[in-house]
Image (tube, coloured by chain):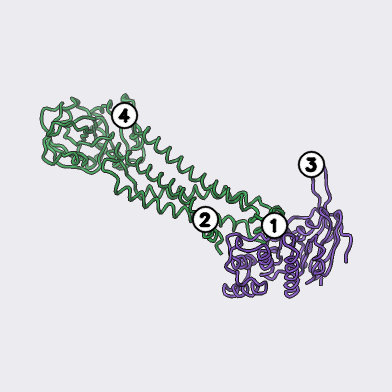
Amino acid sequence: MTIFTLDEVEKTFTNGEIEENILKGISLSLKEGEITALVGTSGSGKSTLLTIAAGLQPASNGEVLFDGNNLTTMSDEQVRKVRAKEFGFVFQFAHLVPFLTVEEQLMLMLEVSGSTLSKKEQKNEVDQVLDVIGMEHRKNAYPSSLSGGEKQRVAVARAIIHKPKVLFADEPTASLDSKRSKDMMELIRYLTKKMNITTLMVTHDEEMLSYVDRILQMSDGMVLENE
Amino acid sequence: MNIGWKEIKKNKSRFLILGSIVFLVSLLTMIISGLANGLSQDNAALIKDLPEGHFYMSEDAEETYNLSRIDTDVQNEIMNKHPDAVALSIQMGFLNDQDDKQQSVAFVTSTNSDLFEQVNKGEVIVDRSLKEKGIKTGDRLTNNQLRDELVIKGFVEQKKFSHAPVAYINREDYKKMYNVEQMQLVFIPGEDSAQSFTGLQSYSNKDFLSTIPSYNAEQMSLTMIVSFLIVISGMLFAIFFYMMNIQKIGLYGILKAIGIKTSRLFKMIWTQMFFITIIALTLSISLSHVFNLIAPEGMPFHLTIETTTQLSIIFLVVGFIGATLSGLQIRKIEPLRAIQQGED
């Protein structure tokens, strides 16, 4: 079942008098629970495509349809609500809140997403997720005392704790070594499959492609291959 | 979850430094306000303690009360029309105590009124500050311009004029001392608007205070210092939060990307601002009121709950404005830019 559709999406940047087409009419669909990787050379437009799909910047033309709703016609506040409730994000760096413990990072995400669970239920939910990512023993730790790999695992936990429908991951393993990158991808795959979360991921690491269901090759603002 | 409070808990030293600066600035402001009020009382308690109303002095006195002479007929006309009106005169002078030591005083005499102490001929009631200089009830004091002695009948609390203790004397004695028949001023209490009398100019209590030599200059200097301190405290908040926000642009961007409302980030700053300010103000109010109690007797320090409440409200409003101005940059932060930045 298709959950996400991009229809003839274009993105144009104006630099002085020069107009640059970063995305040239991209159309694609994402199926529920599927992990899709966007690959391509630097400047091919893959990160721009991901951020437009995630509602972090508007498209110049075209439509972004999520679960039957057109993100391109929504107000900023409506898009914010969709992002908070339905989307999860993992970036190249963990970007954790430095003054919140691991447990508080996840509790905050549940609160932001508008969770209707009681405080006790939320704590149980957090404990379960931390158990899955092997971080329960560090739940009272602050980010400054975590290793790079641990921080990124917490970032993944924060991205899925509220059970989003779509996970957007922009180079999630770029700041990790080879061993930790594989662990990270295994974790993302395990969690998204278990929770039936659709994933759109940007990566330049070919080793990570073995963990995805579908690869979209991008070049010069267009999708070349749809494997 | 109160993320503002969580940040304070995690970064105690950073917020302690800001809190300490706000505490010191607010304490200094309270102390200077106390001195300003104290000097104001020392300069004009006699006038400031009167109810709201209007003073009248002769037009040709050109706003100098001791050059004013109220025509007796006009005075009688006013007194007949306004039974609560009072005619009064004030002159700076000296009293010689029993050790022949000169004490500077402001002689005050008036027609019958509850607003000013009334004494019989040959008697004087003085401000309590003279008691600390060894003058007692029953003492016989002299004046170089008065042949007769003046007997101390009693003391009054905090009645000063032009930084000198007030000495209430009888009209007959005043006339002999200064060789004048007319009074200088007429005061009519409780009037909403001034009335017109031939040859007289009206002044509200506040306007009349301005005619006292040095009163305005003294108060303006102190008010300016207090105003600067308040502005500085607002700038402190604006600069502190601006610097903190600059460091957290990446974080704010990520928080916005995951769906946190901009208004929640503002609430975080406001919570921190109010928390710091309230603690700093509580400490500075307590300390300044302790100082009010232990200040040396001769120091003109007068700090009321009303003044500290007003200053506290001003500090909170200025702090709020400062913190809000610094937070305006949060509105401009785009999640996308923050994501593209490296980690802090």
Q: SS at mark 1?
A: helix
Chain at numbered mark 4: B
- Specify whether residue B183 is in view: yes
Q: Residues within 10 Å of mark 2 (few under 14, many from 20)?
A: many
Label 1 – label 3 distance at C-alpha: 27 Å
For mark 3, name the chain. A
Label 3 element class:
loop
Q: Nearer the viewer, mark 3 or mark 4?
A: 3
Residue A16: image tag: 3
- From the viewer's side, name the closer residue of A13 and A170: A170
Chain corresponding to purple in the figure: A
Q: Position of residue A129 (x, y in %)?
A: 65, 73
Q: Give the letter of the green chain.
A: B
Q: Residues within 10 Å of mark 4 (few under 14, many from 20)?
A: many
B21 left or right, relative to B76: right
> Which is closer to the viewer, label 1 or label 2?
2
For residue A74, which quarter of the picture? bottom right
Q: Which residue is mark 1?
A: A76
Callout 2: residue from which chain?
B
Looking at numbered disc 2 in the image, what kind of residue is underneath it?
Gln
Dot 2 corresponds to which residue?
B272
Could you tell me residue B317's position as x and y percent?
49, 49
Looking at the picture, which amino acid does disc 4 mark? Leu
